[in-house]
Amino acid sequence: MGRYRAPAAKKSPYITREGYLRLQQEEKAIWKRRREVTVALTAAAAEGDRSENAEYIYRKKELREIDRRIRYLQKRMPDLKVIDLVPDDPEAIFFGAWVTLEDSDGNESNYRIVGPDEFDVEPGYISMDSPMAKALFKHSIDDEVTVQTPAGNQLYLVTDVRYDSTSN
């Protein structure tokens, strides 16, 4: 068995205005954090033997992780396209929509379809590249949507579609 790993599929280049601003803030904050870690690393390196210096080893690892994230942001952000337009049909599901779904048991769920760089479980953001979002695209209120999940096919009813920036 070789070590070759096929490259990951390209992510969609779309992002909401809020998501892009969040990435810009993260980039600023990470540069500030990098300066702090560099100072701590320099102090740890001055303590002597680096091979058994836990502080030095930890700070080198932290600096590597910060640099990896900075490289990713610098490479990814110029390729992103900010989408903040409401589609012509505001009842149809497209990028940036808040969607309320009802499952077969009557449970409701709220999701916002966002770019792959900003999805998060807590506020209910799902990536436009996810199976759920792909199944929802171009549907509208009162449509039944079948989503293929690891547990099998799930049937949902679209009960609401909104294009505001907040969930409620």
Image: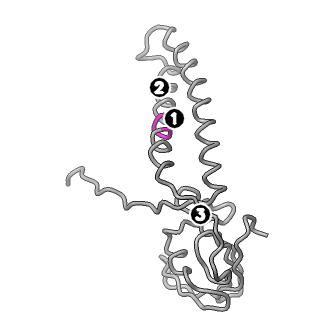
Placement of 94 over or under 153, stated as above or below: above
Considering depth in this image, is 159 or 92 the residue closer to the camera? 92
The region drawn magenta spans: 66-70
- Residue 156 horizontal side relative to residue 66, left or right: right
| Quarter of the C terminus within the rendering | bottom right
The mark that comes first in sequence, 2 or 1, is 2
* Residue carrying label 3: 83
Name the colouring of the figure.
Answer: one colour
Which image quadrant for residue 18? Answer: bottom right
Q: Nearer the viewer, mark 3 or mark 1?
A: 3
- Badge 2 amino acid: Lys
* Residue 136 position in % (x across, y down): 56, 80
Q: Up-down: is 5 above or below 139?
A: above
Furthest residue in direction right, as rendered: 168
Figure quadrant of the N terminus: bottom left
- Mark 3 and mark 1 lie on one chain; the one further toward the N terminus is 1
Is-magenta flag for residue 73? no
Q: Which mark is residue 66?
A: 1
- Amino acid of disc 1: Ile
Q: Nearer the viewer, mark 2 or mark 1?
A: 1
Q: Which residue is mark 2?
A: 60
Question: Which SS type dominates the magenta stretch?
Answer: helix
